[in-house]
Image (tube, helix red, strand yellow):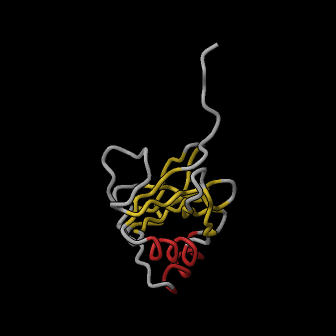
Amino acid sequence: MSPCLSTLDHLVLTVADIPSTVRFFTNVLGMTHHLFTVADGSKRHALSFGTMKINLHQHTAEFEPKARHVQPGSADLCFLTQTPPDVWQVHLSQHAIEVEAGPVSRTGATGPITSLYLRDPDGNLIEIGIAV
């Protein structure tokens, strides 16, 4: 039997400013901020939603091991929601977040989605999709 993967445990975003990133992802996208302790006793920042986690690394102070070419603003992430796009558009507008594109039809991992595209404080592309 060949080995296979079952799920994604977490991903890492390298960011220019952790407090700005935390504010955006908690206030705008509704994630929860956590400080967690690693084996060496140091504290790290993470964002969670559902059963997913995003660890945050401060640019120029990343934890080892790390990606070969770390850079703020190099990610393209798609998050799924059950909230309709028009509700998101009002919410994003209230936070002065520009929608770059959408609602537009796309194909997600499990089928068709309708998506909105925006940017986080580092310029990462954020896609918010709802299954159709």
Q: Residue furthest top?
A: 1
Residue 49: x and y in percent read 65, 61
Specify whether residue 132 is in view. no
Q: Toward the viewer: 16 or 49?
A: 16
Is residue 114 something one can see in this rendering? yes
Q: Quadrant of residue 9?
A: top right
Q: Quadrant of the N terminus?
A: top right
In the depicted structure, whether residue 37 falls above or below residue 122: above
Residue at figure coordinates x 56%, y 80% from the top left:
91
Q: Is residue 48 left or right of residue 23?
A: right
114 or 30: nearer the viewer = 30
Q: In front: 82, or 58?
A: 58
Image quadrant assignment for residue 15:
bottom left
Give 92 or 21, whichever is nearer the viewer.
Answer: 21
Residue found at x 62% / y 66%? 34
Whole-percent x and y of residue 7?
63, 39
**Lateral position of residue 85 relative to residue 63, left or right:** right
Residue furthest to the front: 40
* Residue 67 position (above or below residue 28): above
Total number of numbered discs in the rendering: 0
Which quadrant of the rendered structure holds the C terminus? bottom right
The location of residue 64, given as percent across then percent down, is: 43, 47
Q: Position of residue 89 (x, y in %)?
A: 52, 77
Query: In the image, what residue occupies the spot 62% across and 61% down?
Result: 36
- Residue at x 52%, y 62% (from the top left corner): 128
